[in-house]
Image (cartoon, grey):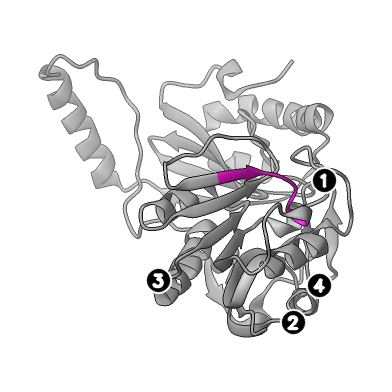
Amino acid sequence: MRLSWRDIAFPDDVCSVRSISDQNLQYEYLDVYSSTVTISIQCKNAKFEISHGSLNTRFVSALPHHFRIKVANLVRNMHATICTKTGIMVTKPTVRILRLPHHFRLEYENLLKELRANPRRFKVFKALYFEVGDHPSGMIDFECSFAAHHISRLHPETILDIGSYRHFILGLLAHYSVTSIDVRSRRPMCSNETVITCDAKKILLPGNSFDVATSLCSIEHFGLGRYGDEFDPDADKKAFSEMIRVLKSNGRMIFSTSITRGQPYIAFNMHRVYSHEMLRALCANLECEDERFYSHEKRSFCKPEEVTNKPDQWDVYCGCWRKSI
């Protein structure tokens, strides 16, 4: 049986519980009147989306007293449940407490009463969020902005995409015709998209066909079987060679992938994590125009020497390379 937050009888001062996933980070938000408790959990070997959280007892003391026993009992069960049901070990929990300003809480209560007095035909209930400040951004924002910058600079007539984020492809389709390669069958999202279902290590297209090839956070997955593709430890190299083959002379390869300054590794079957040297070797027959590095810790682009070297962690590489032949 899967334990869920909704299996726990929360006290009245908990307004909402929600969870999201971002690559190998899991976030659980408990919106409480007295504070917003944010638990960030580093997962050892896979991305997963799960409706319940895994908490560390270091966080329990930050919660209201009447809430601690329930959470402590939940903690003991959650680690075992996640491991049993998904095979995932949860490691390296960190905690950040964001205090809800007193004036915000008072204003919330007053405005809630006012809204309930005149609900304008709506049902009104508590769902307290406090998300003021700078707009949040993550690695996907930085990857997409990197690719968008270079595509805008190049004004390509033909674009091939291999496995990028679907919302990124939708953005491209607002301005360009796009040919998409996907190992999983799907329908085109717009009339100016052509979808080809095939394995990227053998692209069913002639050479010298595209001005730009994009592949955001994709090559690290190729050949590991996660998406039903054939197991092939060298599929990333084969697919990258295929992307170069279908580029026109002077075409650009714009891609992102996972990187570490530590020991490169494969978290099977989630992804590979490369060294900078390995990525440069993939691009040996290309000319580098731009490289950027995204740090999860800094939540921004960083210097190459600031890329993580911690075991089982990774940051993001973004590169724009030109085919000169």
Magenta stretch: residue 173 in it? Answer: no
Q: Which of marks 1 and 4 is nearer the N terminus?
A: 4
**Badge 3: few (under 14), some or many (20 or more) residues near its Cα, within 10 Å?**
few
Which image quarter holds the N terminus? Answer: top right
Q: Separation of disc 2 and disc 3 at Cα?
A: 24 Å
* Circle nearer the viewer, 3 or 1: 3
| Callout 2 touching callout 4 (CB < 8 Å) | no
**Badge 4: few (under 14), some or many (20 or more) residues near its Cα, within 10 Å?**
some
The amino acid beneath tag 3 is: Ser
Q: Separation of disc 3 and disc 1 at Cα?
A: 34 Å
Q: Residue 269 carries which label?
A: 1
The amino acid beneath tag 4 is: Gly
157 on left or right of 25: left
Q: What stretch is highlighted in magenta?
A: 195-201
The amino acid beneath tag 1 is: Asn
Q: Name the residue under label 3.
A: 152
Q: Which of marks 2 and 3 is nearer the N terminus?
A: 3
Q: Which of 117 and 2 is in front in this view?
A: 2
* Circle nearer the viewer, 2 or 4: 2
Q: Nearer the viewer, residue 210 or 116?
A: 210
Q: Position of residue 96 (x, y in %)?
A: 54, 52
Q: Mark 2 points at which residue?
A: 285
Mark count: 4
Q: Earlier in the sequence, mark 4 or mark 3?
A: 3
290 on left or right of 155: right
The amino acid beneath tag 2 is: Asn
Q: Separation of disc 4 and disc 3 at Cα?
A: 34 Å
Q: Which of marks 3 and 1 is nearer the N terminus?
A: 3
Q: Name the residue under label 4.
A: 262
18 on left or right of 4: left
